[in-house]
Structure formats: structure tokens, C-alpha cells
Image (cartoon, rainbow, N blue to C red):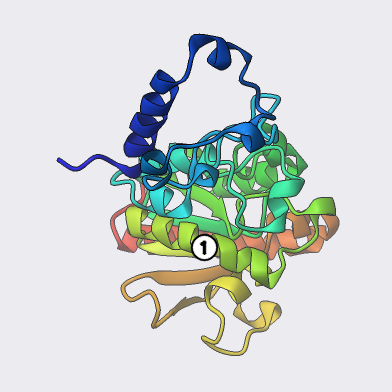
């Protein structure tokens, strides 16, 4: 079985270290990169900048080494994918500079309802779980009113996995950087339905599907050619209910439609 690239790199490092004196190794510091003279046979095996070590000192304070998107996406189980993503120290977009944690999801990877929101907020950024702040608790209550447990009956994630500064909307380039991870989540879960919370989630997931008006389309099921076999529904983002309580009856009505859909698909558990 061929060795993964990181194993080859580790072996190369071990060979190099073995060739230097013990005294040199004992004084080697994270800032000594420029002083290292790497034998050609070692240098040909890998680029030192690709190591899962940061000689610049940027990983001080216990920050994990960066794991490539390709390695994350190559995982064969959702559990391994989630662990790799959450611990990846991803640097694919500018949000990596201000986040505290990468927020993969919340809920069950066995669920057949996938909920996609906009982005993590302050509480999610702190705890590393999706929709655990005020909006998340509001959403939990709406779903509980129709007999759904969001931790059991749904998997909840976001368009982007890192909190935008000031809770602003994700930029196009940030959503694009995260899109492969979201598509991999959809591939793993194979949901019967995807609930898009708010217009931002719709624009980034189903862009070009059709013209969209939140007031006209919320609560209606539709299909997307990009995702055959999956039913979609847009619902008001629960944060909107915190500022406009008049939306609550509509949100409850949309939740009831979701329950009817789940009963028809025989995936509703009382």
C-alpha cells in the first residue's frame, strides 16, 4: 500500500534529523528555518513549506497545522471528514484570520433533513457548533413544536464554516472557498430535503435556479437541477424572528409543511 504524502515527508524529516548532530537538534528553534541546509536527496522529496510544521512561529499558542482541502475531502466517512475539517486550520479565505473555531455542523449525520444557514455567529464561533446561539434556540423551539429534535432529526450547517467579522454576510469568494466542503456534506448525508434558512443561503446554494423573492417563495418546496432527487424549501432565518415576531406564524406554517413532507417520505419520528 503506498504511503500517504505526509508519511513520506515525516520519513524524510526523520532521515534528515538522524544525519545531524544531537547538539544541533537540541538548539533547533522554530525561527531557524533560514539556517537549515537540506541535502539534495531530502529536498527532492518535499518542499519544506509543505510540512505540517510551521517554522515561522505562526503556529505558536497551540494552533494546529494546516490540513489541505484535498485531504479533508478525501475522507471516506462523515465522522472523519468532520474531524478533519474542524481541526484543519483552513486558510482558504480571509475568514480564517478572525475566527476562533471552524464550525462544521450540529445534529445527526444519519438524518435525512439537511439545514443550511448563512454563517456561524459569536456563540457558534466560541463553541464550535452550528446554531447554538439565540437564533439556533429559536429554530429549535419552532421545530420542537412539530415534534422534531434538531439534534436527532436534522444535520445543521452553514454556507461558510467560519464567522464573518461583525456577523456580516459572507462574501462571494468566502462562500466559494467553502463550497466544496458543503457539497461533500450533501454527498455524505444524501438528504431527502434541504432547508435553506434565509435568502443568503438560497443565493449561494441555488444561484441561477430562478428569480427569488423571500416573501413569495418561503415555505414552498422546489427542486434544483444541480441536486436531483433532493427537495428544497426556503424558510425564514430564525434570526429574523428575533427582530420581527410577526414572522413567527409563517415560520410555524412552513415547519408544518416540512412535517407533512417527512411523513410522506416516511422519515418522521414522533
- Relative placement, left or right, of 191 versus 206 is left
Q: Observer-nearest residue: 87 or 160?
A: 87
| Count of numbered marks | 1
Question: Which of the image's four quarters has the C terminus?
Answer: top left
Residue bearing mark 1: 195
Please determine whether, in this image, residue 178 is positioned above or below residue 102. Answer: below
- Relative placement, left or right, of 100 versus 5 is right
Question: Which of the image's four quarters has the N terminus?
Answer: top left
Please determine whether, in this image, residue 194 is positioned above or below residue 210. Answer: above
User: Residue at 59% of width from left, 72% of height from top?
Assistant: 204
Q: For the residue labelled by badge 1, is the local secondary structure a helix, a strand or a loop?
A: strand
User: Residue at 53% of width from left, 77% of height from top?
Assistant: 206
User: Residue at 32% of width from left, 63% of height from top?
Assistant: 264
Please determine whether, in this image, residue 172 is positioned above or below residue 163. Answer: below
Residue 218 seen in the figure: no
- Other-residue count near label 1 (Cα within 10 Å), few / some / many at <14 / 14–19 / ≥20: many
User: Residue at 43% of width from left, 80% of height from top?
Assistant: 224
Q: Observer-nearest residue: 37 or 47?
A: 37
Residue 120 position, x and y percent, is 68, 49
Residue 228 position, x and y percent, is 33, 76
Residue 240 seen in the figure: yes
Q: Observer-nearest residue: 148 or 91?
A: 91
Residue 196 position, x and y percent, is 56, 65
- Relative placement, left or right, of 45 versus 241 is left
Please determine whether, in this image, residue 94 is positioned above or below residue 227. Answer: above
Find the residue positioned furthest to the left. 1
Residue 89 position, x and y percent, is 59, 41
Amino acid at each position: 500500500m503506498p504511503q500517504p504524502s505526509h508519511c513520506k515527508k515525516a520519513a524524510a524529516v526523520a532521515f534528515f534529523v538522524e544525519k545531524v548532530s544531537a547538539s544541533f537538534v537540541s538548539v533547533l528553534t522554530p525561527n531557524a528555518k533560514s539556517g537549515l541546509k537540506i541535502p539534495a536527496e531530502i529536498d527532492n522529496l518535499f518542499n519544506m513549506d509543505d510540512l505540517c510544521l510551521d517554522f515561522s512561529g505562526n503556529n505558536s499558542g497551540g494552533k494546529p497545522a494546516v490540513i489541505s482541502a484535498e485531504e479533508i475531502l478525501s475522507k471516506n466517512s462523515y465522522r472523519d471528514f468532520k474531524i478533519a475539517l474542524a481541526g484543519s486550520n483552513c486558510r482558504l479565505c480571509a475568514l480564517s484570520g478572525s475566527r476562533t473555531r471552524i464550525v462544521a455542523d450540529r445534529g445527526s449525520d444519519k438524518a435525512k433533513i439537511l439545514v443550511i444557514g448563512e454563517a456561524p455567529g459569536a456563540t457558534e464561533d466560541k463553541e464550535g457548533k452550528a446554531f447554538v446561539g439565540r437564533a439556533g434556540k429559536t429554530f429549535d423551539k419552532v421545530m420542537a413544536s412539530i415534534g422534531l429534535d434538531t439534534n436527532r432529526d436534522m444535520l445543521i450547517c452553514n454556507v461558510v464554516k467560519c464567522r464573518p467579522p461583525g456577523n456580516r454576510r459572507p462574501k462571494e469568494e468566502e462562500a466559494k472557498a467553502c463550497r466544496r466542503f458543503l457539497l461533500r456534506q450533501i454527498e455524505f448525508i444524501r438528504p431527502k430535503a434541504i432547508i435553506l434558512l434565509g435568502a443568503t443561503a438560497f443565493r449561494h446554494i441555488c444561484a441561477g435556479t430562478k428569480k427569488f423573492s423571500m416573501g413569495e417563495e418561503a415555505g414552498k418546496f422546489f427542486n434544483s437541477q444541480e441536486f436531483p432527487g433532493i427537495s428544497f424549501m426556503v424558510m425564514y432565518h430564525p434570526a429574523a424572528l428575533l427582530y420581527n415576531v410577526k414572522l413567527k406564524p409563517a415560520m410555524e406554517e412552513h415547519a408544518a409543511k416540512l412535517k407533512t413532507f417527512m411523513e410522506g417520505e416516511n422519515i418522521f419520528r414522533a
